[in-house]
Image (tube, helix red, strand yellow):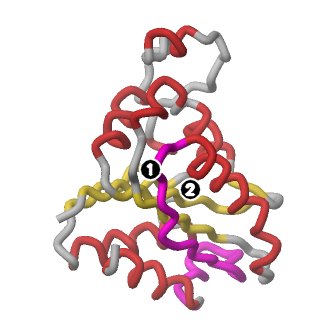
Amino acid sequence: MKNVLIISSSPRRGGNSDLLCDQFLKGAQEAGHRVEKIRLSEQKIHYCTGCGVCNATHRCVQPDDMALLLEKMVQADVIVLATPVYFYSMDGQLKTFIDRTVPRYTEISNKDFYFLLAAADTQKKNLARTVEALRGFTEDCLEGAREKAVIYGTGAWQKGEIKDTPAFEAAYRAGKNC
């Protein structure tokens, strides 16, 4: 049994990337894994101020929910990062979250990563910048990170349209096989 942490950065409950998270969760639970989904829009996460205190202390001085989320990342075996793609990149909630991993990013090691993307754009190639940014975080910053899959939820503009795309089933299968 694996400890699976799903980070949904969708600002909309039931938005397209959030629905992909639910599908992954469903598959992972059916496979017998322990799964937790965190909706970043429901957390209190401040922007990084670049003060540098965490470089020495490995703790952020800001009183918010990030310390608990970092502990969950350290304890997870599998981490899912899900985002709607706005203007060719991840949304602000996920970028802020990633920026705030600095205090403990060296402890987020040897994890399997899945990226779930939802976009109105119909061209997978136009999501390349988003994937590149996510890989910059996982491959360049986290020791032993293993990218297991990228689910491209393209062609989903209106809330719920992701259900009619191949990505919806792909997210479920990825969870089932994580």
Picture quadrant of residue 48: top right
Looking at the image, residue 35 sits to the left or right of residue 166; the answer is: left
Image quarter for residue 77? bottom left
- The residues colored magenta run 142-164
Residue 131 coordinates in the image, percent (x, y): 68, 62
Q: Quadrant of the C terminus?
A: bottom left
Label 2 packing within 10 angstroms: few (<14), some (14-19), many (20+): many
Q: Amino acid at mark 2?
A: Ser
In primary-sequence order, the first of circles 2 and 1 is 2
- Would residue 84 be counted in the magenta stretch? no
* Circle 2 residue: 10
Which corner quadrant holds the N terminus? bottom left
Q: Which mark is residue 39?
A: 1
**Secondary-structure class at tag 2:** loop
- Quadrant in which residue 124 is drawn: bottom right
Classify mark 1: helix, strand or loop: strand
Residue 130 percent location from the top left of the image: 72, 59
Amino acid carrying label 1: it is Arg
Q: Nearer the viewer, residue 45 or 53?
A: 53
**For residue 1, which numbered disc appears in the image?**
none
**What residue sits 31% from the left and 49% below the top?**
76
Disc 2 + disc 1, Cβ < 8 Å: yes
Q: Position of residue 169 (x, y in %)?
A: 46, 88
Image: 177 above or below 73:
below
Task: Give the residue at x 67% y 49%.
Answer: 136
Q: Residues within 10 Å of mark 1 (few under 14, many from 20)?
A: some
Closer to us: 54 or 126: 54
Q: Is residue 156 left or right of residue 7?
A: right
- In the image, residue 149 lies in the stretch drawn in magenta: yes
What residue is drawn where x is 51% and y is 57%? Answer: 81
Is residue 169 found left or right of 84 in the rendered image? left
